[in-house]
Amino acid sequence: MRRASLSAQDARGALEVITLLGELASSQAVVCSLHQPSPKVWGKVPQFILLSRGKTLYCGGTGDAAAKAFSALGAPVPSATSPADHFIDVADDDAFVSSATA
């Protein structure tokens, strides 16, 4: 019998949890913190708030809405890049955050 790697188990578990949270969100507010979400997990997130240096950098929908907002701010999502990873990288860029939240 072949066992799945711990990474595969973690990814599967994360997807199951985010799916359950999505079901709960149909009838109540749900807030969670995601650390390096996989593309499958990120695809199930309808909205997010991105904080940086104690300020809101973005609050809104995922997908096209976020990509358009970041493009308008001068930080378009590069092709073949995970949007979630890109948003975290942007939030960690001191120069960008200073200009975007000024």
Image: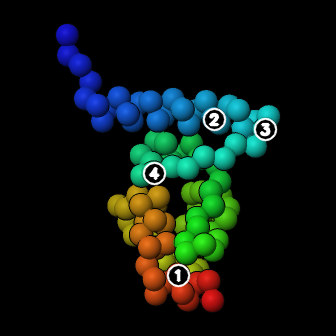
Q: Is label 4 in a helix, a strand or a loop? A: loop
Front residue of 29 and 19? 29
Which residue type does callout 3 highlight?
Answer: Gln
The image position of residue 55, as x and y in percent, is 63, 74
Which quarter of the rendered picture does the C terminus lie within? bottom right
> Residue at 49% of width from left, 42% of height from top?
41
Placement of 95 over or under 33, stated as above or below:
below
> Residue at 55% of width from left, 67% of height from top?
67
Residue corresponding to mark 3: 28
Which residue type does callout 2 highlight?
Answer: Leu
Of callouts 4 and 3, which one flags the residue occurring earlier in the amino acid sequence?
A: 3
Residue corresponding to mark 1: 97
Gap in angstroms between the C-alphas marked 4 and 3: 23 Å
Which quarter of the rendered picture does the N terminus lie within? top left
Residue corresponding to mark 4: 35
Of callouts 3 and 2, which one flags the residue occurring earlier in the amino acid sequence?
A: 2
Camera sees residue 38? yes
The answer to which image quadrant residue 66 occupies is bottom right
Gap in angstroms between the C-alphas marked 1 and 3: 32 Å
Which residue type does callout 1 highlight?
Answer: Val
**Whether label 2 touches label 4, CB < 8 Å:** no
